[in-house]
Amino acid sequence: MNQPSANSQDVKLAGFGVQDLFVDLVNALSAVKQLSEIDCQVDDEKTLIRQALASLIQYQDMERCSFFIVDSEGLLSNVAGISAGELGAPEVNMDSPLRFRVGEGLIGAAAATGVLQHCQNCHEDKRFEKTGNSKQSPGSIISVPVFTFNRTLIGVLNVSHPQAYYFNDWHIRLLEVYKNILGQLITTRRLVQHMEQQIASRTAELESLVAETNQLKDHFASMSMHDQLTGLHNRRFFYDQVEVVIAHHKRYKTGFCLLVMDIDHFKVINDRFGHLFGDQVLTGVAKALKRQVRNTDILVRFGGEEFVAIFTNTRCDSGKTFAERIRQEVKTLEWSINQEVVNLTLSIGIYCLNSDLIQSEQAPDIDQMINYADAALYQAKASGRDKTIVFGEACSDQL
Ligand SMILES: Nc1nc2c(ncn2[C@@H]2O[C@H](COP(=O)(O)OP(=O)(O)OP(=O)(O)O)[C@@H](O)[C@H]2O)c(=O)[nH]1
């Protein structure tokens, strides 16, 4: 505002300052325009306030603008301040900012009453609390309370000039408009921040729920493919994998062996020593089987005391040798109960699908293969148990 004085408004209106009035109006509109263009998404509130103060000082010939934010304990702290000479200079760090209680001094009075306070001559006005070097005290000050949308006090905007009686009605009207826009800017920024925090926290909650759900899904998927007692894969896993295994062997024109293995007279163990002991025995046998098969083979508990294995890429003679190794290993197992040592034996039926047959139309499907291996197992049981018999071969105790 150009060269105002205590009654400059009247002078202007009397026709002496029409041009000045026009310049003042353009400056005021420019300040408001610049304020309204501030991006309310800046990183912190102090930066936003500082930008707002800069837009005021740039277009108005005030000496200094500052902003005091009120906290929940009624303390108003100076969070930003800028003088005309500091425009464009880096922000000064406020280590021990000036503070007033609500009700204290001019700033405190603006906060307490909610009404703009105008100190025309700071040297005489008792409301003005002198701070620091009194020689640097301003001549006049306006303190304007700034509110949120719902009339909650945000803080006080303070403008000063070294000259007493510097500010006039024009300044007052401009600051009333200005504080409304500043209040809206700060409120919008706080709302946006709040929403962003809520979105971030909801997103984090959702992400953790999704992770938990995936863990549960994996757990149930794994449970549905595993036998809970022995930890081996189960019949469902077998049927899930076997088609892939067959397709692989067809493609690479290699044969494999399918084994059905059944503990001999397992019912007797259950009947004599109880079901819990029977469970321990089953688990021990499962571990022994697992030790004997390769990672690329398939081994499942098919049900009860019956296990099924596929020796991948294995010819019949090798398959028989591996099966015998398993049978011998199981024979060496021992369990102690009631001062008795318990041993058991295993009967094994094998069906071998050789590389010629796997390519042909006559290749049996998986259920037929299991039936053939079962038939061999039946022969092993019928001929005295503790044997390995290959389907299609003459029954023999010898390998
Ligand atoms: N402890 C225990 N026993 C089981 C489980 N599943 C099946 N069984 C028992 O396994 C036994 C199988 O008996 P059978 O089918 O007569 O066969 P076996 O006694 O082994 O006789 P052969 O097969 O003819 O040598 C039954 O007593 C079942 O109750 C299990 O998870 N735990």
Image: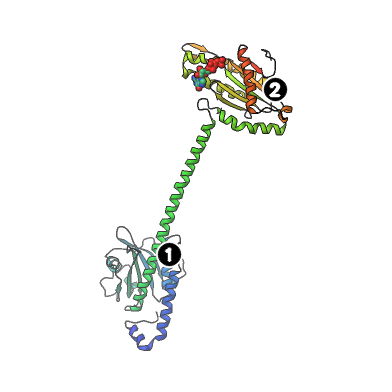
For mark 1, give the secondary structure: helix
- 275 in relation to 133, above or below: above
Q: Quadrant of residue 295?
A: top right
- 396 in relation to 218, above or below: above
Tag count in the figure?
Answer: 2
Where is residue 355? Give x, y as percent: 72, 28
Where is residue 271? Give x, y as percent: 48, 14
Is ligand 1 within 8 Å of the beta carbon of the residue shown at mark 2?
no
For mark 2, give the secondary structure: helix
Q: Quadrant of residue 378?
A: top right
Q: Amino acid at mark 1?
A: Leu
Going by the image, does 361 lie left or right of 27?
right
Give the residue drawn at x 35%, y 88%. Answer: 14
Going by the image, does 170 lie left or right of 290?
left
Q: Which of the labelled discs sits on residue 316, or is there none?
A: 2
Looking at the rendered image, the quarter that the C terminus falls into is top right
Classify mark 2: residues with Cα within 10 Å, few (<14), some (14-19) or many (20+).
Answer: many
Where is residue 39? Give x, y as percent: 46, 65
Between 57 and 176, the residue placed more toward the observer is 176
Classify mark 1: residues with Cα within 10 Å, few (<14), some (14-19) or many (20+).
Answer: many
Residue 166 visible in the shown view: no
Mark 1, residue position: 48
Between 307 and 378, the residue placed more toward the observer is 378
- 46 in relation to 14, above or below: above
Residue 235 visible in the shown view: yes
